[in-house]
Amino acid sequence: MARVNLPSPIPLKLACEIVNGELIGDPETLIAGVSEPQTAQSGDLVFVWSKTFAEQAFTGQAAAVVTSREFSREEKPHIIVANPRLAMAVLLETIFPPETFPARISQTAIIGENVQLGEGVFVGDYAVIGDETVIGDGTIVYPHTCIGKRVRIGSRCRIYPHVVIYDDVMIGDRVIVHAGAVIGKEGFGFVWDGERHRRVPQVGTVVIEDDVEIGANVCIDRATLGETRIGKGTKIDNLVQIAHNCILGAHCVLAGQVGLAGSVQVGNGVMMGGQVGIADHVQVGDGVALLAKTGLMNDAPPKTQWAGYPARTRMQWLRIEAVLNELPDVLKLLRQIAQRVEILEKKSHQQS
Amino acid sequence: MARVNLPSPIPLKLACEIVNGELIGDPETLIAGVSEPQTAQSGDLVFVWSKTFAEQAFTGQAAAVVTSREFSREEKPHIIVANPRLAMAVLLETIFPPETFPARISQTAIIGENVQLGEGVFVGDYAVIGDETVIGDGTIVYPHTCIGKRVRIGSRCRIYPHVVIYDDVMIGDRVIVHAGAVIGKEGFGFVWDGERHRRVPQVGTVVIEDDVEIGANVCIDRATLGETRIGKGTKIDNLVQIAHNCILGAHCVLAGQVGLAGSVQVGNGVMMGGQVGIADHVQVGDGVALLAKTGLMNDAPPKTQWAGYPARTRMQWLRIEAVLNELPDVLKLLRQIAQRVEILEKKSHQQS
Amino acid sequence: MARVNLPSPIPLKLACEIVNGELIGDPETLIAGVSEPQTAQSGDLVFVWSKTFAEQAFTGQAAAVVTSREFSREEKPHIIVANPRLAMAVLLETIFPPETFPARISQTAIIGENVQLGEGVFVGDYAVIGDETVIGDGTIVYPHTCIGKRVRIGSRCRIYPHVVIYDDVMIGDRVIVHAGAVIGKEGFGFVWDGERHRRVPQVGTVVIEDDVEIGANVCIDRATLGETRIGKGTKIDNLVQIAHNCILGAHCVLAGQVGLAGSVQVGNGVMMGGQVGIADHVQVGDGVALLAKTGLMNDAPPKTQWAGYPARTRMQWLRIEAVLNELPDVLKLLRQIAQRVEILEKKSHQQS
């Protein structure tokens, strides 16, 4: 049941104010919940940004609809907005604001020497914060978080339980780090010394810019020299691996279980589907899109789209995949032709 | 050495009682350990469910064998059962019962307000349990577990160290959640607002039904609206990613590192090999099998088998992979034929 | 900026002593930092092991270069060594030695009964160590680590925050386990009993040999019977999954997100790229190399190289991938030839 009840019903005109739209129909229509079109009950408001769901939304149980002008219909009261999905985000964040935390340092938290905590900081139970670390105003440190020494965390961040941040990592403002993420671990660098893999010390660090979100159990390793960097506004889903010295641009989106080998350079606005892998030192241009499970072994110019492993351009990949389905038949045809050619050759030989 | 010593030797007749089988040979044969056929030592009991290993079991060092009637042989005392693998599970769980825990709340655990703990609940050191959470009888909460507010956990569950359960998640009876798993994190939903990826609030929850097992460092995200749901008896291996709004049926098996994108719907009894990925909104029917590393981008009807990426039916995938090996030779053949046809065409032209 | 400042500048002759090389040029040249060739500033020492970077190193801003004899040039003071990458490791570990910890057991650590801690052991805040566990000299147990009962950990290990080690696991000397790793969880073994997947008790254990390094959020499951074993000196990157009963040899390297199904046997010196998967019971010989994303379903003889899924030898995989790019054109050619053959056949028929 993809729907949620509102804490208390609101009139449609209030919803319209919140999303800053144009109301058509009865402004007093009571809204008791928000739903996807398929699961709408009476009293629900549904948000629609495709033709398929518009039909369902306007003819189903919903009390009212939020949609763009092109899908406007007469059957139900509705609100017209430029971007219905954005309107849903705005309505939900207004009605269900994120939990607030008091300015409070748990007595069970262990705070090192010379730690600076900004105004309104919350530090949960059993959190451990190392010496000389600085945390900005309004940041929430959940229970059981381990933050190393000389770490800098900006303001209004949320650091969830069981996150581990190694020494010297730098984190910007409004960054969210979800449970179990590990930031700043030594990179995976070894050199064979004749007898064993010997560690190359990883004396660099990690820099996370403003507005980045890091998923649960993500790993971001520190650089050998210099830094591993995640550009501002980039969003990283769960279980992603980012190796030492990777540099990611702004506003990228990395879906779950993506893996980046060492020193990968990623431009701005790059999209990666789930389980994508990128080989070390590869450069990925601005606006590149990598379909799920792509294995990128070579540089990708800006705005290109890639798929498959080894990665091909999306068009070439689609073309080849289409051909592959015919391949067993093609082989039969080829053998048949070979026989027919042989027959022709024999005849031709007899005639000459 | 894939074998284990029993705490103390037992006579074969006792093993036979435990597995409820039919004993052939000396009931007083002493059993000192349990082993795989390849590693059996004298005194070991081995369990066999294939012809290959039956030979090895009856002619090797083992003291006795548990097998099905078809593999029964005269060389050694043995026990006949319908399902030797099930018999092994039964014998091992009888001889090595899971550790029991006293009804005890650690003094270092931090229990919120209005928390309800059932009878016999164990809460380990440094566990943190949020306000209004309810935990059923006999559930074991290991040290360092973080459980949010208004969470419901059923009876006889085991929640291992460093598990993080976000607010409002619902968990059934006899559920096992292994170390480091993160349940109920906000789903990975964003909308571009013209300047940045803006979070779509994730106001739904996660429901885990009875008898589910969740592996180490698994991530199961909460729904945008409504719920993410794991059906009863479903078993999930380590490092699996389950995105927001996924609905899984009963008795599925997901091997390690599987990744499900948002709103995937999975029927009952579905099997997924390691590193499988499923694209968002895909529907997977009952009894479907996905081979390891399959990338499923389209719906899979019930009882179908899939492999490859993009996924093909297992048969089609095998057929194509077989052809691929011949492909370089095929190309040579084709070019040769093209030349021969050209020669024929010239001749034909000369003749006409 | 892939460079790092030294705590204080050193003369080149001291660097030369540390790496045991041959100094050419001014021994008093002051070194203020270490850098990659591309990011070198004046005062930096750069390490070079390829021709491309040698050019950059000797003509750029760097103060001096460490390289092998073949890349020696006159433009700058330099140090000649046999293995410049090894020299970099040696220099960095001398100048940036790993942090030392005092011999101290945190008052907030909870130490079980009959625990034996060696000399100089450090146990951080909120660590929990179960009964009868033994920890060797000089081992560092970071805050928030959970170590079970009867665990044995050798000397000079580092166990990072939030690591979970289940009961009875054995760990050798100088082992590093990074944050969030889970070692010794029950293996993923079930048998269908007619109504449900029933757990096969996992009564084996895990053995980690000397000098192994285990990445963040890695999962290594305990064996059903016997042991899961990681051979000495093997290095495992983040988010790797190693299922029950796997046996790995010495000095292997497993990149991020590799997944090994149950009972995989791996020889010595095996290299696995990122996101490699290996099916259960597969045997991998000494010195095998698996390219990133390989899905190995069958045994791999020693020293072979594999790629793709299903895995093919690297050569065969490259050959097929090259052909695939031509495939759409090949199909057109084939259809054209089929037509031409048909025309020839008609003519031939008319002529006869």
Image: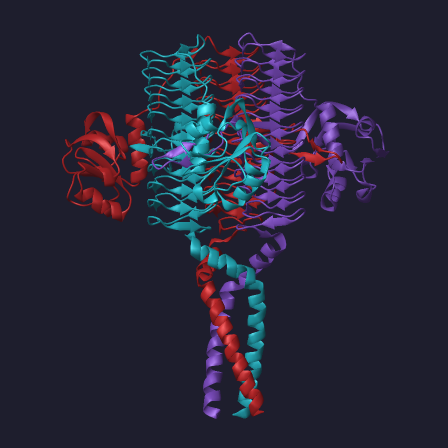
Chain colours: A cyan, B purple, C red
Q: Nearer the viewer, residue A239 or A54?
A: A54
Q: Is residue A185 left or right of residue C261?
A: left
Of the 4 image quadrants, the one containing the N terminus of chain C is top left
Q: Residue at x 48, y 13 (%)?
A: C126
Q: Nearer the viewer, residue B113 or C214?
A: B113
Of the 4 image quadrants, the one containing the C terminus of chain C is bottom right
Image location of residue C93, percent across then percent down: 32, 28
Q: Residue at x 64, y 18 (%)?
A: B139
Residue C188 to residue C347: above or below = above
Residue A11 to residue C137: above or below = below
Looking at the image, can residue B278 be seen? Answer: no
Looking at the image, can residue C171 be seen? Answer: yes
Q: Quadrant of residue C43?
A: top left
Image location of residue B318, percent across then percent down: 60, 55
Q: Specify the farthest residue to the front.
A: A26
Image location of residue B147, percent across then percent down: 54, 19
Q: Is residue A73 left or right of residue A222?
A: right
Image location of residue C213, percent across then percent down: 45, 30
Q: Residue at x 62, y 52 (%)?
A: B314
Q: Nearer the viewer, residue C168 or C347?
A: C347
Q: Quadrant of residue C148?
A: top right
How many numbered callouts? 0
